[in-house]
Amino acid sequence: MNELSPLPYKGTRDYYPEDKQLQNYIFEIWRKVCESYGYQEYGAPLLEPLDVYLAKSGQELASDQTYSFTDKGGRIVAIRPEMTPSVSRLVAARRQEMPYPARLYSIANFMRYERPQKGREREFWQLNVDIFGVDSVLADAEIITISDQIMKSFGAKSDDYIIRVNNRNLINFMMAQYLGLDSNRAHAMIKLLDRKDKIGRDEFLDQAIQMFDENQTENMKKLEKILDAKTMADLPEEIRNNSSVKEIQALFTLLERADVKTVVFDSTLMRGLDYYTGTVFEVYDSSPENNRSLFGGGRYDGLVGLFGAESLSAVGVAPGATVLEQFLDIHNLLPKFESKTDAYVCVVGAYQKGANYLAKALRESGLNIEVDISDRKLDKQIKTADKKKIPYVIIVGEEEIAKSEYVIKNLETGAELRTSIDDLILKLKK
Amino acid sequence: MNELSPLPYKGTRDYYPEDKQLQNYIFEIWRKVCESYGYQEYGAPLLEPLDVYLAKSGQELASDQTYSFTDKGGRIVAIRPEMTPSVSRLVAARRQEMPYPARLYSIANFMRYERPQKGREREFWQLNVDIFGVDSVLADAEIITISDQIMKSFGAKSDDYIIRVNNRNLINFMMAQYLGLDSNRAHAMIKLLDRKDKIGRDEFLDQAIQMFDENQTENMKKLEKILDAKTMADLPEEIRNNSSVKEIQALFTLLERADVKTVVFDSTLMRGLDYYTGTVFEVYDSSPENNRSLFGGGRYDGLVGLFGAESLSAVGVAPGATVLEQFLDIHNLLPKFESKTDAYVCVVGAYQKGANYLAKALRESGLNIEVDISDRKLDKQIKTADKKKIPYVIIVGEEEIAKSEYVIKNLETGAELRTSIDDLILKLKK
């Protein structure tokens, strides 16, 4: 038989213990922040019918990037590329019984068929935080506040990141009324604006001009006014008079009260997904070397209704773990690896039985104890403990068993001590 | 557009908050037991090349039950149906650098295309606990001890479950030397023995007799001796003299020392997977109404070597969450649902701003606080808190804001109290 490759599938990662501990650190912060706002954890299946994504996620995500296939029963299914349709389905299935506002979160794995690059993987882990059943902008403010709190909880300072906010109704108004684009072209312009940072301003303008059949010069001037507005006050008056601007202002007032300092209006922020219906926002890294979108979200009032339930308003956000990991790295916020194992029991001579008993007693007092069962020389056993970054080794041999006293050694300082089992427990519990 | 179904994909489950909390309880016990033995958590990709399973997992798992498909790049991949090949691959990739014994665990989702039934789902969550680099039976004993400790940690009593143990070398000896079966028939007999509880004794015997071309009566008598042996002592002498019996005895001695009381030898225990090379074991529910295998494991010394690395001995076990959930249910060991939210802040009148400030202050002292933002009547807000099983509501209205005193109400007892924010914190922290 051919040898199998030891490498992971393209665009995916193996998480060795140190990688996994870092991922768990990110998960723990997510969990803590969500639960502090009363959000409850749920879980959803890995597979959904492909139709769920074709409906509202947009062509790129649902077709080009989705891992879809036909199962043995003839169903066309997809490995979830995102959670929003799934959580909407869960809520739709219990539309009547659920208590509202329903506040839900999950941490799950997803797949997208993309060209792997830094911070973007084919399998990725994402938090989803969603609130259902609140029409008012209070819900939008809460989701953005939680996003901000997540960044703060990782130790980010207010100049490390910035939250950009826009509104789909305002975008639609700008496309249709202000720029006079029909619905197909408006859609194309939104997608183009969404890609403007990737393709650069010149390429963007070259493509944008082709969207206008007439009055190209005038329309391009108008478009540049949108592009260049740094604040809401910079926008042309006819845009500023749109009702959604009031909503954005109300949102900013709530965010200020909630101590969210790092938020700005951005008239060019689009969010690629088709299902957004109001507020959209993205959290950006503001460091020059990683000036990119970290994660985002928005309001999507139409999704629950797709699943045969009465429609229901919804706002959500979905940070990914890998992008945050990169952010923590760049901003020097990565936690140090710390072994969860309190001590490593080494065995000298034929005293495995005694070592196992000692380990058992220590575990029963609540300690995490690894015991060597390799029958190797002591130095090799200590090297194993050291490689695993376990802080202490305990040595068990003839003398130790005879006296019921054990040598405990601090691997960082080298300090050694011979002591009783009760003292060992006290020492390790500190 | 057609309406989308609100139901989950066939054979999978939606985990609403109460379901997810139960699953998390199971995960937490797994985690705690593994870490108490010094095992470190890792993660592996959802997809692997299908070849990885075709190599050693056996026809049924790798072909009939696997979700496999061709990705957009032409690779034939599978959604992992089990973790053992993946963890072996991870270890193979760092064969030289890893510290041994390598003790690893993971909690992950898997998929198998099976007919859904009670306790068996197409997507399922499983713990995998594996130790690499120990040839001796000490490793087998540790993995079985951990399996026993998991059951104990869920509150199971020693008569709630039983651990059955056998050995692949002994099985191979019984098939080839004792029953005289060639390797194809030995393989078929192993698979048949593995299914004997499902098909029943009569059907088993009918199919078994066809494996013997000659001396059918004599061979069937021999086979029945294996079937009917209750202990090692009941086995025919020529089997008892096989060297693997000594290994089983050594294993039982170690298990006795480790306080594993619920373990028996079972000469008919097979385990379906092809990669086992020594000890195999399964934990059974011993209640009459659910007399089934809960989970199992064994030694598989050949897998790491398949990935181009020097071969390495390995022992592992893999309990699934759903089967354990059923076990806990039957044995009355399910934990009660408890909200993680400490209090629900209700708003009377136009005092959302004050309610949000109060919630913020309570969160900053470490409490989990949900705040109503629905602008509904008080009784509806309280009903929401009650439905979510949150123990307390705090009421914020005109008087409360004016006096900076809030009404806190225990939803179970109905007791109410008007108090300051500092007292609220003290009360809720208890």
Image: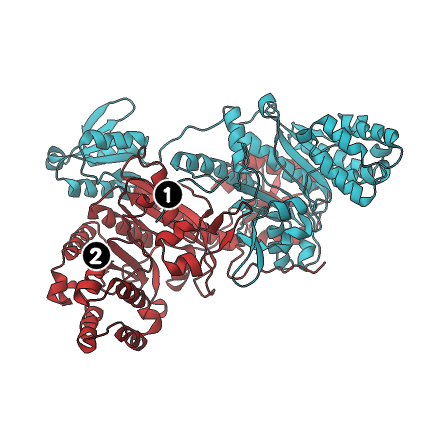
Chain colours: A cyan, B red
**Whole-percent x, y for residue A101 in the image:** 64, 49
Q: Quadrant of residue B279?
A: bottom left
Answer above or below: position of B265 versus A42. below
- Position of the N terminus of chain B, as image quadrant, is bottom right
Q: Which mark is residue B247?
A: none
**Whole-percent x, y for residue B190 in the image:** 28, 64
Secondary-structure class at tag 1? helix
Q: Quadrant of residue A210?
A: top right
Q: Chain of mark 2?
A: B
Q: Is residue A60 left or right of residue B61?
A: right
Amino acid type, mark 1 = Arg
Q: Which mark is residue B89?
A: 1
Answer above or below: position of B399 versus A89. above
Q: Chain of mark 1?
A: B
Considering only order in the chain, which callout, 2 or 1, is on the residue closer to the N terminus?
1
Amino acid type, mark 2 = Asn
The residue carrying pointer 1 sits among few (fewer than 14), some (14 to 19) or many (20 or more) residues within 10 Å by Cα, namely many
Q: Nearer the viewer, residue B170 or A36?
A: B170
Q: Nearer the viewer, residue B137 or A185?
A: A185
**Looking at the image, which residue is at 63% across and 48% down?**
A63
**Whole-percent x, y for residue A247 in the image:** 76, 38
Q: Is residue A390 visible?
A: no
* Residue under pointer 2: B169
**Looking at the image, which residue is at 18% across and 55% down?**
B248
Distance, label 1 to label 2, CA atoms, is 24 Å
**Whole-percent x, y for residue A185 in the image:** 79, 41
Secondary-structure class at tag 2? helix
